Image: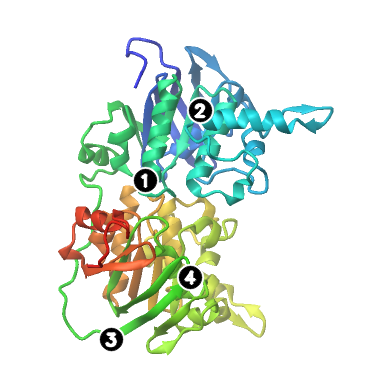
Amino acid sequence: MPVSPPDTAPLLAMRGIVKRFPGVRALDGVDLEVRAGEVHCLLGQNGAGKSTLIKILAGAHQPDEGEVLLDGEPVRLATPTAAMKQGIATIYQELDLVDGLSVAENILLGHERTSFGFTRRGETNRIAADLLRRLGHGEIPPGTEVGRLPPAAKQVVSMARALSHDARLIVMDEPSAALAHDEVANLFRIIREITAQGVAVVYISHRLEEIREIGDRVTVLKDGRTVAVGLPATTPTGRVVSLMTGRDVEYVFPPRPEPGGDRPEVLRVEGLTVPGVFADVSFSVRAGEIVGLAGLVGSGRSEIIEAVYGARRASGRVLLDGRPVRPGHTTTSVRLGMGLAPEERKAQALLLDQSVARNITLAGLTRYARLGWMDRRREAAEAARLIEALDIRPRDPRRPVKTLSGGNQQKAVLARWLVEGRRLLLLDEPTRGVDVGARAELYAVIRRLADEGVAVLLVSSEVPEVLGLADRVLVIREGRIVHEAPAVDLDEHRVLDLVMVSTNEESHVD
């Protein structure tokens, strides 16, 4: 990978960056240097200042102090357009593509090729096709609606859009979060090709194993300050985690209780099937048990959870405490004692502009209504109790939930289902986008709920997380359960072997 030698001036230098918001100093003298042609990894817990720093780089925020230099010259990135004109492109975790427009229209959005007010469609499609071929994805049709593409292809379109502006530096915020294992490998191939052409990449990820594979150097932020600059990407994980959190391990799982006792069955699933998605899925979950679903993205894991919850119509039977759950009726599922924390908490679970308290009490508002009036005092007291119990920080029920870190937002989603007590919690990627410190807190919350008798069904793309948190693991491949075992009897290598082998290569099921 052709990285500029250390003695040359960096492509980008951010020095002494300070950013204040009302009541908080988000950045307190942050430094960042990025060389042409390198993958520079920016690490830190949620709330460390990463998002604020990249928004300054993208022109969305202005620093209160400090300077930004490109090729050694001071620049003012007053707007996102100004940043783009300087060759800085940002690809956010939640891609800002327009689903109703074509691939080509998205790639050239904002600098369309027009004549007399009309788009030159042929030229637009040709430029888009050239950029897609440059990224090794000439098979993506420029005329296809972006909304019809899978996540990996949308990621490619976002990169093509960045390159259409002659980007010299591309910021990638959690680019692998929604990608399957093979798609991540292809993403890394594209990044290597881009950097080989001299483009710099600032790469943000909570998956520390990716850093050694794709990164060149690492900068670590903690509490709005730079605690390490330009570390080699080969720095041991324990050292990086220690810089980020003060702890020495990435995954800190609570102790697993000894099996035993005749715990009642809470959930029973029999022959659950959605044609073309998953087939003949049967399993059970007992009170106080955490059952993990392990498998690749697209294997049917999340769809199984949605069908159990009633959000997806399926044949077969779902029983909660022996009572049948009607498919397609989520209100019935909630009434029977189910709660769902979906994969996309911001889009599917949270009212971002509402308070933490309102998000917590949302599923049980009727509890606080009397003769058509809300008992605000009772609602606030219940929210305050759960904020204390789950250690949601800051402990302000009135604070807009969108201002919380990812880990604390996830705790708010969990708290919602504890207002009336739940028999079964369905957790889909509960730590996605959550930093390593907040992960340990969430693990402790989930285990404590199980210890109190709640049954938990868990989906995670991180195999160590499934093995460390679950009591029992169901391995899902191509819509079927291919293996079931206690978590202590499995290791990561075995699980990956099971999920990566196609049905064409293996004709039997373990």
Amino acid type, label 3: Pro
Q: CA distance from mark 2 to mark 1?
A: 20 Å
Please provide percent x and percent y for residue 431.
37, 55
The image quadrant of residue 290 is: bottom left
Q: CA distance from mark 4 to mark 1?
A: 24 Å
Q: CA distance from mark 1 to mark 3?
A: 40 Å
Q: CA distance from mark 4 to mark 3?
A: 31 Å
Please provide percent x and percent y for residue 311.
52, 72
Could you say whether the residue bearing mark 4 is in a helix, strand or loop? loop
Which residue occupies 32% across, 56% down? Answer: 502
**Residue 258 as seen in the image, left or right of residue 289:** left
Q: Earlier in the sequence, mark 4 or mark 1?
A: 1
Q: CA distance from mark 4 to mark 2?
A: 37 Å
Return the residue at label 1. Answer: 182
Q: Earlier in the sequence, mark 1 or mark 3?
A: 1
The image quadrant of residue 365 is: bottom right
Q: Earlier in the sequence, mark 4 or mark 2?
A: 2
Return the residue at label 2. Answer: 134
Task: Residue 275: give its label.
Answer: 4
Amino acid type, label 4: Pro
Q: Are marks 4 and 3 in contact (CB under 8 Å)?
A: no
The N terminus lies in which quarter of the figure? top left
Q: Disc 4 or disc 3, which is closer to the eye? A: 4
The image quadrant of residue 260 is: bottom left
The correct choice, above or below, for 89 with respect to 36 in the image is: below
Q: Earlier in the sequence, mark 2 or mark 1?
A: 2
**Residue 97 as seen in the image, left or right of residue 454:** right
Q: Residues within 10 Å of mark 2 (few under 14, many from 20)?
A: some
